[in-house]
Amino acid sequence: MSNLYNKTTAREHVNNSLNAILKLSPLLAAHPFIADQEWLDDFASQAVLPNEVEYQGGRRLGYFYQWLWQQLILHHPRYELLAEEVQLTVNKRTLGAIDFLVKDLHSGRVEHWEVAIKFFLAYEGSWPGPNARDNLDKKANKMLSHQLMISDHPAFIKQYQTQFGKIERRRLIMQGRLFYPAFEGYTGSDIKLAKGATHGLWCYSQQAAGLDLRPIAKPEWIAPPCFRQIADEPVLTSVSNPTMAIAPDDKVWFVMPEHWPQSSMKK
């Protein structure tokens, strides 16, 4: 990935990102499929960071995040990666793809994992993303009720169960950051959030003047740098696209175009 933060090599960026997702809290709670803080802490306590790995995949942040989890699974003493991106089709129609099929070496159970890195902003009783067509409630519902259930579909059982075994556990690993308005009274939806979900602040472009925010590139969203690491960057005073930025106290902000989310919905 390009546009890394100042004076950081590609390998340092990978290491920073691996460490970040081992510390990031889940966004959601109150569903048996959700990987909660206890499970994430246990996974992190045994995790082994790979040496000298470099990302060569696509530019989308989701691809990078999935690759980071692939690396963590491959090097974890408790889990074995059985398959990744398992495509399920019925009558030439694609039902979806399974992120990971994983074997728990302690229990012997085969598990289906879906992973997602997401950023949502509290706005008028909902949680839209920087692209406001994305939404926390809709995303969670899709992943929990559809994406994680395709491994229970008769087509999966017919095509893959003999090869990989019966799925005995499903996990949604959804990490990221929730942003609350710094100068407005907006709240998010009543979806059940994890108590330790990582937070930030957001404001509109015209409200950013005087905050001394420093913009960061999208590859840095998983592991935002400290303010001092980007001190050579110009101060953020206006934006035309949703922009993550760091404040002098190292808090993470989102600065949004003036007509967000309406402008984002029209794209």
Image (cartoon, grey):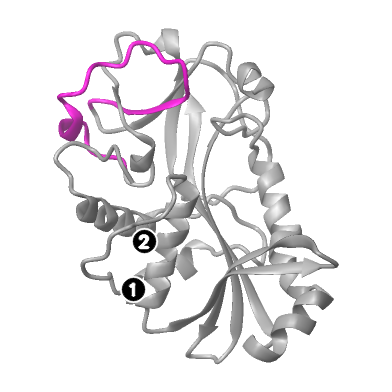
Q: Say if 190 sits above or below 90 in the image.
A: above
Residue drawn at the location 53% of the way across and 50% of the way down = 27
Q: Secondary structure at mark 2?
A: helix
Q: Say if 180 sits above or below 137 in the image.
A: above
Which disc number belongs to residue 158? Answer: none
Q: Main secondary structure of the magenta part?
A: loop
Instruction: Characterize the local packing of mark 2: few (<14), some (14-19) or many (20 or more) Cα atoms within 10 angstroms.
Output: some
Quadrant, the C terminus:
top right
Q: What segment carries the magenta color?
A: 224-248
| x and y, in percent, of residue 41 in the image | 40, 67
Would residue 187 be found to the left or right of residue 45 on screen? right
Q: Say if 254 sits above or below 172 in the image.
A: above
What type is the residue that disc 1 sits on?
A: Ala
Residue 248, quarter of picture: top left
Residue drawn at the location 49% of the way across and 50% of the way down = 62
Nearest to the observer: residue 90 or residue 131 = 90
What type is the residue that disc 2 sits on?
A: Leu
Which residue was labeled with disc 2? 22
Residue 246, quarter of picture: top left
Q: Is residue 191 visible?
A: no
| x and y, in percent, of residue 191 in the image | 67, 44
Would residue 82 be found to the left or right of residue 87 on screen? left
Mark nearer the N terminus (1 vs 2): 2
Residue drawn at the location 50% of the way across and 15% of the way down = 257
Which residue was labeled with disc 1? 47
Q: Are marks 1 and 2 in contact (CB under 8 Å)?
A: yes
Nearest to the observer: residue 44 or residue 266 = 266
Would residue 267 be found to the left or right of residue 78 on screen? right
